[in-house]
Every structure is written in C-alpha cells, then in structure tokens.
Amino acid sequence: MDNTNDFSENLNDDLDLSEEQTIEEIKEPSSSKKESGSSVTISASQAKVIKTYLQNLKEIADKLSDMLSLSGVDATGSIMIGQIADGISAIQGDATPESANIIEGVFDGEQMVGPDGKSYSVPANYASKSKLVEGDILKLTISGNGAFVYKQIGPIERRREIGVLDIDSKGNYAVVSDTGKWKILPASVTYYKGQVGDEAVVLVPKNGDSSWGALDNVVRNA
C-alpha cells in the first residue's frame, strides 16, 4: 500500500483542489506548465493547513516508529499484521459512519479553521479541558443528525510560560509575562477558578509567535 499517495489524496480532498490543482502538481509542476509560465495558486488558509500538516508528519512518523519498536518485533524483524493494524487504529481513531461528514482544520485559539477558510465553533469547555493550543489540528465529525464531535489529531509541540492572570476593560482574559501576552478562554479561567493577579501557567506553541494560549494551571494568591 502506498501511504504517501493516500496522504496526498486525502490532503487534496481536504483542500478542495480541482483535478488540475493536486498536491503533486504543486510540488512538481509539469513541464508544460513550466514552459507556459502558469502557476497554481492556493489561499492563505490552505497554505496554513499544508504547513501544519507537514510540521506534524515528523511527529506522526516518530510515533509509528515507537509503536513498531514496542510491538514485539522478533529477532527476524517480523511483526504481526494485527499489531500494525492496532498501531494505525491508535492514530486514526475509531471508524466513522459513512453518513458522517468529516472536516479537518487548524485551531486558531477560539475556533477551527477548515481548508475552505470557513470557521467552525469549538465548545469553549472542550477547548479548555483539552488544553488546545493555537495550531493544533482537529478533526470535526458532523453526524447525520447534525451533532458536532471534535477530536484532536495533530497536537503541535508546546512550551510553558509563567505569568500573571489579567483582564482588560472588555472582560477579555490574558496571561501576561515579561516575554509576552497570550489571550485565554474565559471558560478556562472559570474551570481553574482563577482570579486577576493569580500566577498562571499557559501552554503556547514551542516555535513561532501566537496570540492565544491554553491555561495549564493557576496558583491562587493567599
């Protein structure tokens, strides 16, 4: 089975590209297109999804490697097909009914942005308890009866920052430190029973800047 082709096909579907705008053509334009000088253009939201997918590929590959090393490979290097299937199931999750609509996107701190540029509401309680970080990849399953079910399928690398819980005149919460300021969801403040002035620990992307953070813990002032 060619997993690389499967991944490209899935990503083409996620990005809603036409047949003339496949990922393969983006990576390696045909000679005719090179000669004519034409190019394929993708939107900023599509580019963000592609970039995030690529950043997570190495992490997924490392997890698969770890699974294989812990799956009981014998001296000849043999491994049971069932063990591989178990590993794949652990990553992909349970099977989804055919009637369900599947959308993958990137969490922007409040909502999930799909490959079509549309924003999908993420329950604040779920985002807070799951400690979703800006840049995480989510899978949204919309069932036949219209129910929305989210699953975190591609967490990015994180780092912790320590700061002070603050609130502005409009009621927006943030964690402020000497190195930066990150907006946080009010639901997370309620969950941890935080108060303005409390010391707070926030999770943010390990690499790059971000506007949002996920509240990890609160140390109440005496």
Image (cartoon, rainbow, N blue to C red):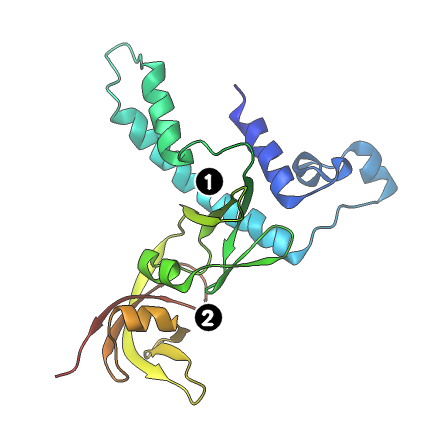
Between label 2 and label 1, give the one nearer the viewer. Answer: 2
Name which residue lies at 38% across and 22% down: 85
Q: Image height check: is 193 above or below 83?
A: below
Amino acid found under the numbered disc labelled 2 = Ser
Q: Is residue 205 visible?
A: no
Which residue in the structure is indicated by mark 1?
57
CB of mark 2 within 8 Å of CB of mark 1? no
N-terminal-most mark, 2 or 1: 1
The residue type indicated by label 1 comes to Leu
- Give residue 162's position: percent from left, percent from top: 27, 72
Point out residue 42 in the picture as x, y percentages from the top left corner.
Answer: 70, 51
Q: Residue at x 54, y 48 (%)?
A: 146
Please, which residue is most extreme toward the front here? Answer: 145
Residue 42 seen anywhere in this rendered image of the structure: yes
Q: Residue furthest left?
A: 222
The alpha-carbon separation of the residues under discs 2 and 1 comes to 24 Å
Q: Secondary structure at mark 1?
A: helix
- Front in this rendered view, residue 190 or 181: 190
Badge 1 crowding class, 10 Å Cα cut-off, few under 14, some 14 to 19, many 20 or more, is: few
Q: Residue at x 87, y 41 (%)?
A: 36
Left or right: 123 as drawn, with respect to 103: left
Q: Which residue is mark 2?
A: 211
